[in-house]
Amino acid sequence: MVVCWWFNYYTVFVELGDTDTKIELLHPLGEDSPIEGFLKYNPAGGIHHICLEVSDIHKAVDSLKGKVRALNPEPKIGAHGKPVVFLHPKDCDGVLVELEQE
């Protein structure tokens, strides 16, 4: 289990066999957690976001400028200890997308 104090939630990763595919389970740490807000809006739970691994996060974000808004244009350290940027759901057909540096 990983505690993400900077995003205010617990996370557990379930690895699927011999693939690079993982399912991340999230639990809010408090009222101000973005996960708590998601659960208030979606009381039954559901898929919060998908994550795509990119070889160069800065080039990936630059390639999206003018097409897709980044919620945090400067990468932050995510749950795996790698730089991440989240893309605005309104620009991604309603899906919150996370870009993660390989």
Image (tube, rainbow, N blue to C red):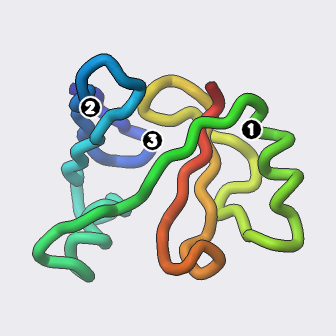
User: Label 3 crowding class (10 Å Cα cut-off): few <14, some 14-19, many 20+?
Assistant: few
Q: Which badge, 2 or 1, comes first in the chain's sequence?
A: 2
User: Label 1 crowding class (10 Å Cα cut-off): few <14, some 14-19, many 20+?
Assistant: some
Q: CA distance from mark 2 to mark 1?
A: 22 Å
> Which residue in the structure is indicated by mark 3?
6
In x, y percent, where is residue 59? 86, 41
Q: Secondary structure at mark 1?
A: helix
> Which residue in the structure is indicated by mark 1?
57
User: Label 2 crowding class (10 Å Cα cut-off): few <14, some 14-19, many 20+?
Assistant: some
Residue pictured at 74% horizontal, 38% vertical: 57
Q: Nearer the viewer, mark 2 or mark 3?
A: 2
Work out which quarter of the rendered image holds the N terminus and state it. top left
Q: Which badge, 1 or 3, comes first in the chain's sequence?
A: 3
Residue 101 to residue 45: above or below: above
Residue 13 to residue 26: above or below: above
Q: Nearer the viewer, residue 26 or 97?
A: 97
Seen in the image, is 25 located left or right of residue 67?
Answer: left
- Quarter location, residue 90: bottom right
> Which residue in the structure is indicated by mark 2?
13
In x, y percent, where is residue 2? 28, 28
The furthest residue to the left: 44
Q: Nearer the viewer, mark 1 or mark 3?
A: 1
Residue pictured at 59% horizontal, 36% vertical: 53
